[in-house]
Amino acid sequence: MTEITPVITALITLISGILTAFVVPYIKTKVSTEKLEQAITIVETAVLAAEQIYNAAGMGEKKKEYVKKFLEERGFTYDEKEIDVMIESAVFKMKEELL
């Protein structure tokens, strides 16, 4: 009778290698993408709220600080540049929708 233990061991090693190389990074990317999309939605909501609260001209810095504080209170820990880009993107999108 032929011993199949080495074949099974090789298959298990191959499958775990495939999982490590392809499936795990894909899942991590998917989770990161979903988290980023959630953050963008929250930034857009905060930008709209800031526009409503600070509706006088020349209050851009107050609006930006409001959005940053809003995000900080909810535990979003992106670096300053990422937050600025998300805010600017949300402002652009808001203005585009108004036109």
Image (cartoon, rainbow, N blue to C red):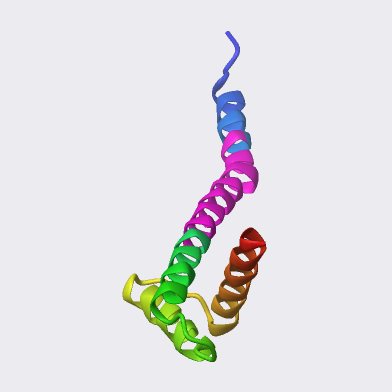
- Residue 51, how many percent across, how many down? 47, 75
Would residue 11 appear left or right of 63 to someone viewing this image?
A: right
**Residue at position x 41%, y 70% in the image:** 49
In depth, the one of 93 and 27 nearer the eye is 93
**Residue at position x 44%, y 80% in the image:** 68
Give, as a single range, the part of the protein colored magenta: 15-39
In depth, the one of 71 and 17 nearer the eye is 71
Quarter holding residue 96:
bottom right
45 in the magenta segment? no
Looking at the image, is 76 positioned above or below residue 35? Answer: below
16 in the magenta segment? yes
- Residue 93, how many percent across, how many down? 63, 63
Looking at the image, is 71 positioned above or below residue 96? Answer: below
**Residue at position x 47%, y 68% in the image:** 48
In depth, the one of 85 and 98 nearer the eye is 98
Residue with the most extreme left position: 73
Q: Main secondary structure of the magenta part?
A: helix
Would residue 46 appear left or right of 74 to someone viewing this image?
A: right
* Quarter of the image where the N terminus is located: top right
In depth, the one of 72 and 49 nearer the eye is 49
**Residue at position x 67%, y 62% in the image:** 99
